[in-house]
Image (tube, grey):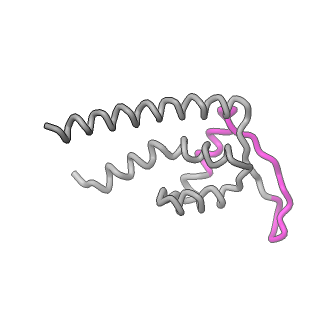
């Protein structure tokens, strides 16, 4: 079994949480989201990002505004809807609980 495959699956599993967290800070353009994720070593390509943003928008978690760009056509900037904010709060709680359980399990494992 290759560790890189497992690590990639872990990153994919938390990607939605990270994207919603980034957008919760301020309206975000997809390439800015990708850059933020790259800085944190959660590498994402546009082919992954755009379908995910569309799915989150269609689920009512994201809205968007068009903003003029000095370097081309208007750009779509995403923001959380009120439903998205509630979803992120619940997802963050689930994440916090999962981290606690995993950490507890790993402490138990490391003391055997």
Q: Residue at x 31, y 56 (%)?
A: 4
**For residue 71, what is the image quadrant?**
bottom right
Q: How many marks?
A: 0
Residue 82, how many percent across, how many down? 73, 31
Q: Is residue 69 above or below residue 105?
A: below
Q: Would you say 79 lies left or right of 47 here?
A: right
| Residue furthest out toward the left | 112
Q: Residue at x 54, y 32 (%)?
A: 91
Q: Magenta segment: does it hold 60?
A: yes
Residue 100, how many percent across, how many down? 38, 33
Residue 19, how many percent across, how many down? 59, 47
Q: Which residues are magenta?
A: 50-74
Q: Which is more toward the observer, 96 or 62? A: 96
Q: Is residue 89 above or below residue 110?
A: above
Considering the image in quadrants, where does the C terminus appear? top left
Q: Is residue 41 above or below residue 72?
A: above
Q: Residue at x 58, y 45 (%)?
A: 52
**For residue 59, what is the image quadrant?**
top right
Residue 63, how many percent across, how many down? 75, 40
Q: Would you say 45 lies left or right of 11 here?
A: right
Q: Is residue 71 above or below residue 3?
A: below
Q: Residue at x 62, y 51 (%)?
A: 50
Q: Magenta segment: does it hold 41?
A: no
Q: Would you say 1 lies left or right of 13 here?
A: left
Q: Which is more toward the observer, 46 or 28? A: 28
């Amino acid at each position: 079994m290759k560790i890189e495959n497992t690590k990639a699956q872990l990153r994919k599993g938390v990607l939605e949480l990270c994207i919603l967290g980034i957008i919760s800070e301020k309206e975000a353009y997809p390439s800015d989201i990708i850059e933020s994720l790259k800085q944190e070593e959660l590498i994402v390509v546009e082919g992954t990002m755009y379908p995910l943003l569309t799915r989150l928008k269609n689920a009512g978690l994201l809205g968007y505004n068009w903003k003029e760009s000095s370097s081309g056509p208007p750009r779509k900037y995403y923001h959380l809807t009120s439903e998205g904010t509630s979803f992120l709060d619940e997802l963050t709680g689930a994440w916090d609980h999962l981290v606690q359980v995993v950490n507890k399990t790993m402490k138990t494992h490391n003391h055997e």
